[in-house]
């Protein structure tokens, strides 16, 4: 074999190896985007590079795999659903208190499912692996709750917080987190609730 043929073979092997490596990276990236959805874009925006963001997301997956998550029993699911209905009814008379209670109820549900409930950012990281599509709602609800504690949230803000909490709550219960019911005056997630009148 001539030296030219050897060089051509080496170049072809290098190009094929590079293409294979690129395909692996692209496949991993696609899998992360699919799994994390909007959380992928958020991580990329918050990190110095796409590679750093992807390493962080893979680390979230690794830590998530160590959790002992448990499905809810039908009885527990029914208990949480009833508690949520009660919250929605109480919202009309005491919106500020109800938002705090909604946060506590969601935290109890998160804990019962087996997720850590300490630091909010750690909680978000763990939840992002399976519940990424509802985390923006959870972040928004958390922000409104904090504003409410400072006396900076109006009734419409509080109504929105309850709607946001409901998205993650439903997702954790295994329901459609963006499902809608017919509007009625008792429920703050309806379009025409009593707080908007």
Image (tube, grey):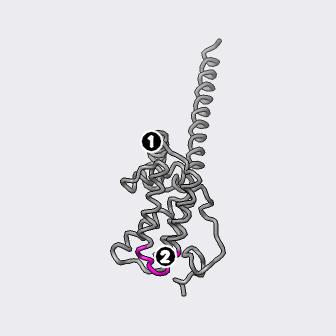
Query: Which x, y percent locates residue 20?
Result: 61, 32
Instruction: Kindly identify which residue carries mark 1.
Output: 63
3 in relation to 37, above or below:
above
Q: Main secondary structure of the magenta part?
A: helix
| 2 or 1: tag closer to the N-terminus | 1
Magenta stretch bounds: 89-97
138 in relation to 15, above or below:
below
| Viewer-proximal residue among 25 and 83 | 83
| Viewer-proximal residue among 51 and 116 | 116
**Does residue 26 show up magenta in the picture?**
no
In which quadrant is the C terminus drawn?
bottom right
Q: Nearer the viewer, mark 2 or mark 1?
A: 2
Of all residues shown, which one is farthest toward the left? 150
Q: Residues within 10 Å of mark 2 (few under 14, many from 20)?
A: some
15 in relation to 136, above or below:
above
Of all residues shown, which one is farthest toward the top? 1
Residue at 46% in and 75% down:
158
In the picture, measured across the screen, residue 32 lies left or right of residue 105, that is right
Q: Alpha-carbon distance for marks 2 and 1?
A: 37 Å
Of all residues shown, which one is farthest toward the front? 75
């Amino acid at each position: 074999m001539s030296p030219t043929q050897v060089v051509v073979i080496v170049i072809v092997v290098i190009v094929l190896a590079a293409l294979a490596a690129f395909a692996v990276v692209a496949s991993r990236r696609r899998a992360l985007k699919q799994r994390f959805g909007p959380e992928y874009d958020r991580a990329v925006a918050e990190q110095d590079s796409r590679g750093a963001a992807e390493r962080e997301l893979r680390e979230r997956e690794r830590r998530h795999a160590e959790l002992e998550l448990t499905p809810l029993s039908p009885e527990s699911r029914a208990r949480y659903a009833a508690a949520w209905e009660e919250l929605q009814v109480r919202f009309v008379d005491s919106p500020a208190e109800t938002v705090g209670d909604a946060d506590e109820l969601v935290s109890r549900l998160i804990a019962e499912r087996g997720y850590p409930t300490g630091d909010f950012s750690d909680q978000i990281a763990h939840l992002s692996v399976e519940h990424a599509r509802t985390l923006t709602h959870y972040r928004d609800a958390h922000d409104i709750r904090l504003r409410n504690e400072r006396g900076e949230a109006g009734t419409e803000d509080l109504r929105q917080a309850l709607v946001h909490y409901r998205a993650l709550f439903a997702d954790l219960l295994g329901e459609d987190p963006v499902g809608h019911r017919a509007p009625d005056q008792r429920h703050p997630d309806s379009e025409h609730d009593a707080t908007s009148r």
